[in-house]
Amino acid sequence: MAKKSYIGEKPEKVLKEVFGYESFRLLQKDVIQNVLAKKDTLAVMPTGGGKSFCYQIPALIFEGLTVVVTPLISLMQDQVASLNASGVDAVFLNSTVAWEDYTDSISKIRRGQIKIVYLSPEGLNTAKIRNLLDDPLVKVDCITIDEAHCVSEWGHDFRPDYLEIAAVRRSHPEAVCLALTATATVQVREDIIKNLALKKPDLLISSFDRPNIFLNVCSKTDADMQVAACIRRHWGESGIIYCFSRRQVDELTEKLQKLGYSALNYHAGLTDQERADHQTSFIRDETQIMVATLAFGMGIDKPNIRFVIHYDLPKSLEQYYQEIGRAGRDGLASEALLLYSAADAHKIRWFFQESADKEKSEFMLQKILDYAGARTCRRKVLLSYFGENYTGKNEKCCDICSLFGDGGVPQIDMTIQCQKLMSCIIRTKSRFGSAYIADVLLGSRAKRILDNGHNMISTWGIGRELTKNQWIEVATLLIDRNFLLKDPEYGSLMLTNDGLNALKNRDKIELPFRLPASYDENGELKAPGTFIPKNRAGAGSTGGVMFPKPEKKSKKSAFVLYKKAGNDKKDMTIGENPEDAELYNAIKKWRKRKASELDVPPYIIFGDKTVEDLILRKPQSEEELSLVFGLGERKIQKFGEEILSIIREG
């Protein structure tokens, strides 16, 4: 059967018939209208916000070719597989393609049989690709630059080859240029417009908010236990754990595997084949957890990642936002857990000593530290960094709001602890930073403390009611209150006049100090209680032993329905009907088998939201299937009878 042409059609028709969606999201329609009008555009949209439709739909409406420049091979493969499954003629050209297939794709492009071609910035700069695009038989209607922040040195993943795109743009003045990114500060946006030579572009900025992602930040106390607790909250679901170093990745992966968790590692120390195999296993739902360095995830289109854990502090909020955006791309509820400690910041600072712009590196680090140490809604802090004012009220948006509500962390009496810390600073001659002061208060016998004789001063060992991280937190809060000053170069602490007066007068000092929190049996945050001495296990701890697997599955069905309704998480309901759970499992089992037959990830067949909509609607005909979320005409033709058969039998 001849493929249907959509040249000159309305975007809404393409959206429904090809991709199976009823309406556009966020800025999609505005961006598409700009592209169709051949108006250069820079669109800033969150990860998972549907940026790909902004060029895929115009590509089908345009007569000519759409060129998509993207940095990672994995994204090309995912996008092309997904487009092909929906009946769209798309190819990618890179070093992984066999020469016979490569030349065949080029021939199809010259014959006008391909609507979208994906290229890397390095590939775009080769003579053979330049010659192809300059061929009189090839009409280039659109040049799309994905991950456009890579063109800016202020971006978190600068790629010099992106700077050559402007030359290609000048060779095709009739083509519209669309730049897409999920993370772009004002400086980065200006660089994108300048370096890509965009012509009087429209700047369209969507909300950066991802309301389905729960933002959770914890002081790193027992990192392995905290990781295991998060996995337990998302039992059987996909997740990514980011670590600072290869060694940490390997060690944590080994621990998880020994405890029976389905986990693989990913970093530059593995062979190309090992990385490819591990990534394939993860995106095909054969492995639950990927433990990785930053090398993993960019361009991965896997929509059902339910948790992203940062085992260590990221270097910037841009990096953090980009990485947590890999969770919940299908709009279903997901979690972003960040574990941090003062040692993480120290490691990062050590690595950027050789940076060409240490001031910029320190600025970016300080912003992520401000976020990690926030005492009010984290979503407000995160979005304000990108110039957005978050006005929503949602007790489930982050750990702070979940525990304390809109008012943030309440002020509590910390007079005694503040007096101990400030007295210790004075007795150590104001020559040391917060980590050292904390060690003295905890009674450390580290060589440096013994050599300085600070085990003999009156404040040595008087602060064992708090952990080291908590003492560092108290110091940070006193800096915020202008009771302490921190030397910008050496990090040493000294008292201000306000601090000296408060200590001298024994003033009452209240701080928004966050006490340890714990989780209930359902994995929900519980309000924090009283101080937990260092020599006891923390709330929810297993004495340093990681949580084992659940002994038996929850009585609740594994089938979770999620109806999008703004920021209110009451839109999540658990399907209690056992028949629905059986049908849910049957459809997912069929999807996995079908994906294996076609050698694609399960989500290429369709995503979890489509599975859930099938359960809700229980369609009995192809006409009713057309109403299901994410099922376009091509997928109904290809899979419809099998799906209907499963539903009828279920």
Image (tube, rainbow, N blue to C red):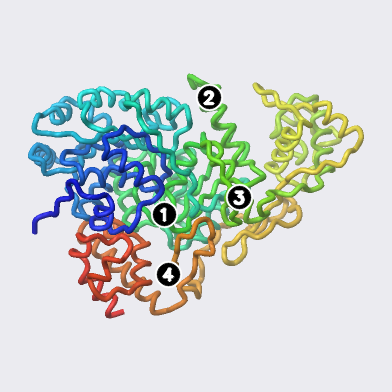
Please tell me which residue is depicted at 67% across the width and 42% down the height of the picture: 469
Q: Which of marks 1 and 2 is nearer the N terminus?
A: 1
Give the Cα distance between marks 1 and 3.
Answer: 24 Å
Q: Which residue type carries mark 2?
A: Lys
Q: Where is residue 450 in the image (x, y as percent from the top left)?
A: 75, 31
Please tell me which residue is depicted at 88% across the width and 30% down the height of the picture: 501
Q: Toward which corner of the image does residue 382 lie, by quadrant?
A: top right
Please tell me which residue is depicted at 69% across the width and 50% down the height of the picture: 407
Q: Which residue type carries mark 3?
A: Asp
Q: Which residue appears farthest toward the right when viewing the image?
A: 505
Please tell me which residue is depicted at 85% across the width and 29% down the height of the picture: 500
Callout 1 touching callout 4 (CB < 8 Å): no
Q: Earlier in the sequence, mark 1 or mark 3?
A: 3
**Along the line of sight, the residue nearer the viewer: 649 or 110:** 110
Give the Cα distance between marks 1 and 4.
Answer: 16 Å
Q: Which of marks 2 and 3 is nearer the N terminus?
A: 3
The answer to whether residue 511 is left or right of residue 335 is right
What residue did someone put label 4 on? Answer: 559
Q: Comparing marks 1 and 3, which lies closer to the viewer?
A: 1
Callout 1 touching callout 2 (CB < 8 Å): no
Numbered circle sitting on residue 356: none
Give the Cα distance between marks 4 and 3.
Answer: 32 Å
Callout 1 touching callout 3 (CB < 8 Å): no
Q: Position of residue 475 (x, y in %)?
A: 73, 36
Q: Where is residue 511 in the image (x, y as percent from the top left)?
A: 76, 43
Q: Residues within 10 Å of mark 2 (few under 14, many from 20)?
A: few
Q: Residues within 10 Å of mark 1 (few under 14, many from 20)?
A: many
Q: Comparing marks 4 and 3, which lies closer to the viewer?
A: 4
What residue did someone put label 2 on? Answer: 360
What residue did someone put label 1 on? Answer: 305
Callout 4 touching callout 2 (CB < 8 Å): no
What residue did someone put label 3 on? Answer: 222
